[in-house]
Image (cartoon, coloured by chain):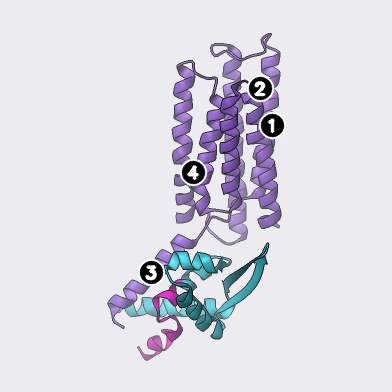
Chain colours: A cyan, B purple
């Protein structure tokens, strides 16, 4: 039991952060606007959560320009994918009990 | 957190994964090939009509049946090619071709397309076949636009292009054949190449 709790990741302990990771593990990348629409978050809210995940090195942030418009693109890092997988497995195990 | 919270988390994860995933297994090459099939099919139709002794098509002739067969073969070959190439891409990416995104994509695509197909058949059998080319382009375009939210962005623009071609074609129904050649042949080759260059290499 202790081991399972240990795998529950605090970094994903929020609806928005969980949502960001869910989207990024099944997509090559997603830009800020797409994440915002899917998650129904405000700019500031989403920005603070992406920053938190970036700090953990779970997501990779790429800033680029499409024409003259700045576009921020997020993708899941290998570390992030593994951490997320462990987190989901831990939840599943908890639910089976 | 309680079990209920975790259950909610799992639901949320599944929901986000489903909503955000798009169908990336569409192959640009299948677009190019179906464009080529359409051009060959159109060339055969053109040959059949111009050798029939008339410059135009009438409904009850033998030629008309040949053209229907010709069109069906073009459509069938395009569908088979798309399925084979998408399946190959899925295997390469270690994914399953038949998942919930594919199902949603097909549902969104087929509803306008089948509606249009039946409508066109009803019109043909009541002798109103003058706008067939235009209607095919319009309904196909609507099907593409409707399906585009589940797949690569270019598909939406191909859809818009087909709709516009279909509307212009409605103004000049006599040139239906040529609009059909541009819409189903040339546009497929152009957009197929764009998808190929952007996503397949």
Mark 3 or mark 4, earlier in chain = 3
Crowd around label 1: few <14 · some 14–19 · many ≥20 (10 Å): many
Q: What is the C-alpha distance between the residues marked 3 and 4?
A: 27 Å
- Quadrant occupied by the C terminus of chain A: bottom left
Is B30 on the left or on the right of A85, as rendered?
A: right
What is the span of residues highlighted in magenta in the rendered image? A1-19
- Asked if disc 3 and disc 4 are in contact, CB closer than 8 Å, the reply is no
Is B151 on the left or on the right of B50, as rendered?
A: left
Circle on res. B45: 2
Both on one chain, marks 3 and 2? yes
Farthest-out residue, bottom = A2
Check disc 1 and report the residue beneath it: B39
- Quadrant occupied by the N terminus of chain A: bottom left
Both on one chain, marks 2 and 4? yes
Q: Which residue is drawn at the image coordinates 62% and 42% (left, top)?
A: B81
- Asked if disc 2 and disc 4 are in contact, CB closer than 8 Å, the reply is no
Q: What is the C-alpha distance between the residues marked 1 and 2?
A: 10 Å
């Amino acid at each position: 039991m202790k081991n399972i709790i240990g795998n529950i990741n605090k970094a994903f302990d929020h609806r928005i952060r969980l949502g960001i990771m869910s989207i990024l593990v099944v997509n090559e990348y997603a830009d800020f606007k797409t994440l915002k629409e899917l998650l129904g978050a405000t700019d500031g809210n989403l920005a603070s959560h992406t920053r938190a995940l970036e700090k953990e090195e779970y997501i990779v942030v790429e800033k680029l320009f499409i024409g003259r418009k700045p576009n921020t693109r997020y993708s899941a890092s290998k570390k992030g994918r593994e951490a997320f997988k462990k987190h989901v497995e831990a939840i599943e195990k908890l639910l089976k009990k | 957190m309680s079990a209920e919270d975790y259950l909610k988390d799992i639901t949320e994860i599944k929901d986000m994964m489903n909503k955000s995933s798009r169908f990336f297994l569409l192959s640009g090459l299948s677009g190019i090939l179906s464009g080529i099939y359409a051009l060959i099919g159109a060339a055969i139709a053109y040959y059949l009509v111009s050798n029939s002794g008339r410059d135009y098509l009438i409904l009850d002739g033998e030629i008309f049946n040949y053209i229907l067969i010709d069109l069906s073969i073009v459509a069938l070959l395009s569908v088979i090619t798309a399925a084979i190439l998408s399946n190959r891409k899925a295997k390469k990416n270690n994914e399953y071709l038949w998942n919930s995104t594919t199902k949603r994509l097909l549902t969104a695509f087929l509803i306008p397309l089948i509606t249009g197909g039946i409508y066109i058949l009803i019109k043909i059998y009541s002798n109103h076949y003058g706008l067939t080319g235009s209607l095919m382009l319009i309904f196909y375009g609507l099907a593409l636009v409707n399906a585009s939210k589940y797949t690569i962005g270019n598909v939406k623009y191909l859809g818009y292009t087909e709709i516009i071609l279909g509307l212009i074609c409605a103004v000049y129904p006599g040139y239906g054949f040529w609009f059909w050649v541009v819409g189903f042949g040339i546009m497929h080759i152009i957009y197929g190449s764009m998808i190929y260059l952007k996503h397949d290499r």
